[in-house]
Amino acid sequence: MALKIVKSQCTVCGACEFECPNAAIKFKGDAYIIDAEKCTECEGQFDAPQCAAVCPVPNTCVPA
Amino acid sequence: MSATLIPISGLQVASRKDMGEAMAKGGGCSSGSCGSSQGPADMDPETWAKVKDHPCYSEEAHHYFARMHVAVAPACNIQCNYCNRKYDCANESRPGVVSERLTPEQAARKVLAVAASVPQLSVLGIAGPGDAAYDWRRTKATFDLVSKDLPDIKLCLSSNGLALPDHIDEIVAMNIDHVTITINAIDPEIGQHIYPWIFYDGKRRTGIEAATILRDRQLLSLEMLKARGVLVKVNSVLIPGINDDHLIEVNKAVKARGAFLHNIMPLISDPAHGTHFGLTGQRGPTGAELKKVQDACAGGANLMRHCRQCRADAVGLLGEDRGQDFTLDKLPEVIADATEARTAYRDWVADERRDRAAAAAQAEATVAETGKSTLFAVCTRGSGRINMHFGKVTEFQIYEADAEGIRFVGHRRADNYCLGGHGDKARMDEILRVLEDVPYVLCSKIGAGPKKRLAEAGIEAIDGLAQDYIETAIAAVLHSKTAHPGRTAESA
């Protein structure tokens, strides 16, 4: 149960890193990536995954 | 034609020395010379001290001072229908667009490099490309670094307002004197057609709910900043058919809450930008439509009419973007600041300003006699003078002269962002289109071909007044027109 970031769509704005309640998102090399170990899809924390809710590009933070 | 124009003696100011003599004859500093509500005589000294070197807050200052934006804040908490940050084009100038994102450390180096080579630099702004208040960690880190190295550079930021109320104390503590909030609607019924969603309090929100929260937070930001003595400029994007009739309500609402300036800007819309409005064919307003809304708001909050809607990484005087000269790969290894150059430049500006105000006051007195309203398109590279070749302009500064005097009323772009590659014909067509209601062009020089084409369209190009102050030249033109044979000669 985790989300991933579709690199080709990502604008590298970093809003997801900022909002992630689990500190699961890091900037590595030239892209943001989600650590599947830490990602909870925000279950029990928020109504919806925070990364997907704030991401400006549709279908960029998606189920892995 | 232009050779027959005779400037009024004593008003023609071709050099600082001439001007000194003209002033000795009894000119004095009266009202602000251009952008009538923005001069030193129109505001309290404390406010004038805050804005006098800020090109975006004082129309008068934009003739002399440069600003730069650093694109350190890419994250945003709302979506606007006119914005798509995936798009980047070095030839394009519009908000939200950048070529290069910077870390706070890189940004601080860039500011130092620009300050060392552009003595006109007075302001550092952070305007995205996302939202400076939402991406606050990066914004604050950048300001902290820059204020340590360059304490004389003013700091300002631009935001949609949603996250602003959370940072008011820090903004005040960091001596940020100027904050811009973009407010496109105060009625959520209208706002919902501009903002598809906002991200607030852990949730993506849409429709009326989103527009209401955003509006409330924007107005709260404005009130909180005003209460703490921070000058607030409100930006509104004019979107024909959506908020054009509504902006007068926005103007009243922001004035009532103490906004210092209201900047009504035209929507920039093109399918190639990939924005919602671009893709759905929503058009931007014409220059005349924009002026109509701006004129309807006169009497409310002071209007800014010289906005260039610059990129989030713009560098230089408004209307002259040098951002591409200062990309990271072009920064020198070691940067030595040049504080003295900035100080010397500011001293020079103080003198120049006094002179220009005096010249303008005299010119206005002359124009008041002629009465009817006339528009002038001016080619200038700054300092309030006619000093640019017609063939070099990418935008015209539009001045209006009538019984009230001479004032700057806006600028009109003639390059249409990417017209460069389409040849002179397309450029000229665009110029004729944007100048349809303007009978005179004032420039330092113009070729015979373009001059003829303008004449055929009923526009007279005048290049005999190069280097004059703008107001002085306008007064001279009007004077020569009203004093031609057959009419009662006016006293010179």
Image (spheres, coloured by chain):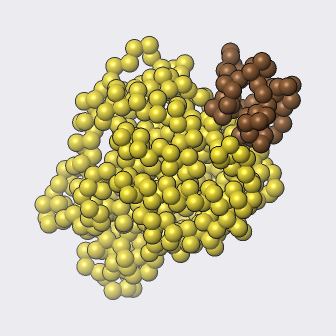
Give the residue drawn at x 86%, y 29%: A63
Asked whether B299 or B482 is in front, the reply is B299
B259, above or below B365, in the image: above
B298, above or below B138, in the image: below
Give the residue drawn at x 82%, y 25%: A2
Instruction: Pick out the residue farthest to the top.
Output: B333
Q: Colour of chain B?
A: yellow
Kindly indicate the quadrant of the structure image that contains residue B421.
top right
Q: Position of residue B309 (x, y in %)?
A: 56, 50
Asked whether B234 or B174 is in front, the reply is B174
Q: Colour of chain A?
A: brown
Question: In this figure, what is the number of numbered marks?
Answer: 0
Q: Position of residue B248 (x, y in %)?
A: 56, 72
Asked whether B402 or B39 is in front, the reply is B39
Instruction: Pick out the residue farthest to the front.
Output: A44
Q: Position of residue B355 (x, y in %)?
A: 23, 56
Give the residue drawn at x 35%, y 61%: B38
Asked whether residue B445 is in view, the answer is: no
Quarter in which the C terminus of chain B is drawn: bottom left
Asked whether residue B351 is in view, the answer is: yes
Give the residue drawn at x 84%, y 32%: A62
Q: Is residue B489 left or right of residue A14?
A: left
Q: Position of residue B51 (x, y in %)?
A: 34, 52
Kindly indicate the quadrant of the structure image that contains residue B97.
top right
B8, above or below A46, in the image: below
